[in-house]
Amino acid sequence: MDDLAWVPQSCTLPTEAQPLRVAEWDGLFAERLTAVSRSGPLRLDLAGGPDVEERMRDLADREVGCCSFFTFTVTSGEALVGLDVAVDHEHAAVLDALAERTAAGGRR
């Protein structure tokens, strides 16, 4: 199974750019992820630091630009930056795959 098989066909990001975008998310999570939870939306907590919130917001904005079914909510705090990720019912499998990938540290 292709490492990016979970990316839905409705994604408008060019196929050749998809691995680069996934690598950006994986890099952010590898550097900063402290907790993952899933009870409804996917909740990711990242250790705060210089530009972490800005980096997360930039990635989330670009992601919505190609995958409009995502909803990202960023909550900032002094030590942690939270990211809630939600999708419509039709794309629940994408959120499941993202949660699994994130929990595995991006290694699949």
Image (spheres, rainbow, N blue to C red):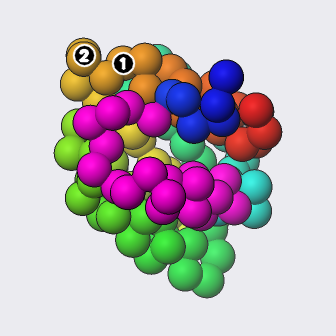
In this rendering, is residue 51 above or below 8?
below
Residue at 50% of width from left, 21% of height from top?
A: 96
> Residue 39, position in %: x, y?
46, 18
Asked if residue 18 lies in the magenta stretch, the reply is yes
Residue extent of the magenta highlight: 7-27
In this rendering, is residue 50 above or below 79?
below
Amino acid identity at mark 2: His
Helix, strand or loop at label 1? It is helix
- The secondary structure that dominates the magenta segment is helix
Report if residue 81 is visible in the image: no
Pointer 2: what residue?
Answer: 89
Locate residue 33 relative to residue 64 in the image: left or right: right
> Residue 2, position in %: x, y?
64, 31
Residue at 31% of width from left, 43% of height from top?
A: 11
Locate residue 16 relative to residue 62 in the image: left or right: right
How crowded is the residue under tag 2: few (<14 C-alpha within 10 Å), some, or many (20+)? few
Based on the displayed image, in which of its 4 quarters is residue 102 positioned?
Answer: top right
Q: From the viewer's side, name the closer residue of 32 and 106.
A: 106
Amino acid identity at mark 1: Ala
State how far apart marks 2 and 1 are (Cα): 5 Å
Asked whether the beta carbons under mark 2 and mark 1 sit within 8 Å of each other, the answer is yes
Residue at 58% of width from left, 54% of height from top?
A: 19
Locate residue 24 relative to residue 73 in the image: left or right: right
Asked if residue 25 lies in the magenta stretch, the reply is yes
Q: From the viewer's side, name the closer residue of 90 and 16.
A: 16
Helix, strand or loop at label 2? It is helix
Q: From the viewer's side, name the closer residue of 74 and 21.
A: 21
Q: From the viewer's side, name the closer residue of 35 and 9.
A: 9
Pointer 1: what residue?
Answer: 92
Based on the displayed image, in which of its 4 quarters is residue 41 positioned?
Answer: top left
> Residue 51, position in %: x, y?
55, 81
